Amino acid sequence: MPLYIHVLACAFGLGSWVSINGLWVELPLIVNVLPEGWDLPSYLTVIIQLANFGPLLVTLAHKFCPGRLRENLVIYAVLSIGVVACVLLAVFWKNTTMFIGQLRSTAFFILTFFLALVDCTSSVTFLPFMMQLPAKYITTYFIGEGLSGLVPGLVALAQGVGMSKCVNVSHVLDNITDSEPPNFTVETQYLPPNFSTEIFFSFLAVMTAISLGAFLILNLLPRTFELSTENLVPDSDAVATVCSGFEGPVDPNPKTNSQEEEEKKQIKVLFPKPLHSGYQLAFIYFMVVWVNGATNGLLPSVQTFSCMPYGNMAYHLSAALSAVANPVACIIAMFFPKRSLVFLGVLCLLGSAFGGYNMAMAAMSPCPLLQDTPLGDAIIVLSWIFFTGLLSYVKVMVGVILRDRSHSALVWCGAAVQTGSLLGSVIMFPLVNIYHLFQSGDICNTKCPL
């Protein structure tokens, strides 16, 4: 197994979700600049859901034109779009336009849509391409996919966050007389981070370009690494069950019916179909809908309201460390899998409790509990880390359970994921942007009762 192939597979997986993960961890700096302010995350959750148009097109192409869609060309296109969008974002992310009487971050929203389109489409194109390589390389690809969340979070921690200070600013009116004193107001000023947002977006462009370069080399390699059932079946439960959910390349020498039946019997012996009652399956799918609705729609929409009252540093740490908690939870699930539905239900309940605390602090914004205290800052940061980590573990294990059950169960799992994410985003958008149930504040001017 050449080492450089593992490196290329890892670098290829790095481009799967690096752009969107990077946007989320950079929000603590962006919300202080763009006119949407604290409402910005609720817009992003809706835009990301709209970007599922990409994987829908790919799925329909596979359904109605089987064998005609060239996935390598789709991957070239989406990664190239990702590089260009990151470069344009570094240049134009501050640009605003007037829309319905209000300033809007039009350029930021449009480029975010294209970045989300790239990352969402990667879910249905990258892994099928990796099926052309031996099974052991797929594990390396998943490591790279995990790094797509870990690396932006670590870079954001190195970037730091602009600390704020309250300063008196004088405003002198044109018609004021010399005898009248100038008018002073208190304004919040943010100190610059270690490096700018433009540099961070340029870093995302470099990461996406590395993924594109790795794919280019992998695609041009001689096809000595063909898909082999001899490699797929004996390797490991995880890899074999992943492969069962996708269509492999067309075999030029199709097997006879007796050979296919014999192989199916062998696979059934190796991987017996788990038995779950109807109530257990309903509980599993409910967890899928709820967990994805909470992590992809409900809570991200109000993270600013939950964390910003505690200060920019609390928000920065919550965003960066929760982004790191996601791949860490996936790694833990890889080495310490636990399929007990009772155990997963308890973890789901605990994660939801942390999410409930985060939502409660958002509802109390701009005056949440323990504001302006180190204990309050620590609790909100830890609450976001445990919320993300626990529910990420549940997502992985529930996906493994359904993946091992059948292909149709995996399809319904994907539908439940998208349903939960869409419901969470659609529910929170009007609550945040139309009914304004969550109130923003200013660190220097908000007066909270003692």
Image: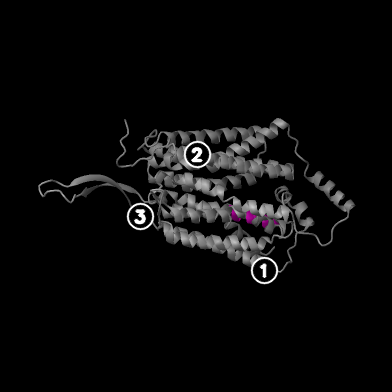
Sequence order check, earlier mark of 2 and 1 = 1
Q: Is residue 390 something one can see in this rendering?
A: no
Q: Position of residue 338 (x, y in %)?
A: 66, 39
> How dense is the environment of label 3, judged by Cα within 10 Å: few (below 14), some, or many (20 and up)?
some
Q: Which disc is residue 220 wearing?
A: 1
Magenta segment main secondary structure: helix
Q: Which disc is residue 192 wearing?
A: 3
Q: Which residues are magenta?
A: 136-145
Q: Secondary structure at mark 1?
A: helix
Location of residue 215 by image quarter: bottom right
Q: Nearer the viewer, mark 2 or mark 1?
A: 2
Is residue 424 left or right of 416 when viewed as pictured?
left
> How dense is the environment of label 1, judged by Cα within 10 Å: few (below 14), some, or many (20 and up)?
few
Work out whether residue 235 or residue 247 is closer to the camera in this orientation and state it. Answer: 247
Q: Nearer the viewer, mark 3 or mark 2?
A: 2
Q: Amino acid at mark 2?
A: Met
What residue is rendered at 35% in x and 49% in y? 163
What residue is rendered at 63% in x and 52% in y? 55
Q: Amino acid at mark 1?
A: Leu
Q: Which disc is residue 428 wearing?
A: 2
Location of residue 67 by image quarter: bottom right
Q: Secondary structure at mark 3?
A: loop
Q: Secondary structure at mark 2?
A: helix
Is residue 184 left or right of 21 when viewed as pictured?
left
Separation of residues labelled 2 and 1 (CA atoms) = 45 Å
Image quadrant in which the C terminus is located: top left
Work out whether residue 34 or residue 390 is closer to the camera in this orientation and state it. Answer: 34
Q: Is residue 163 something one can see in this rendering?
A: yes
Sequence order check, earlier mark of 1 and 3 = 3
Q: Amino acid at mark 3?
A: Pro
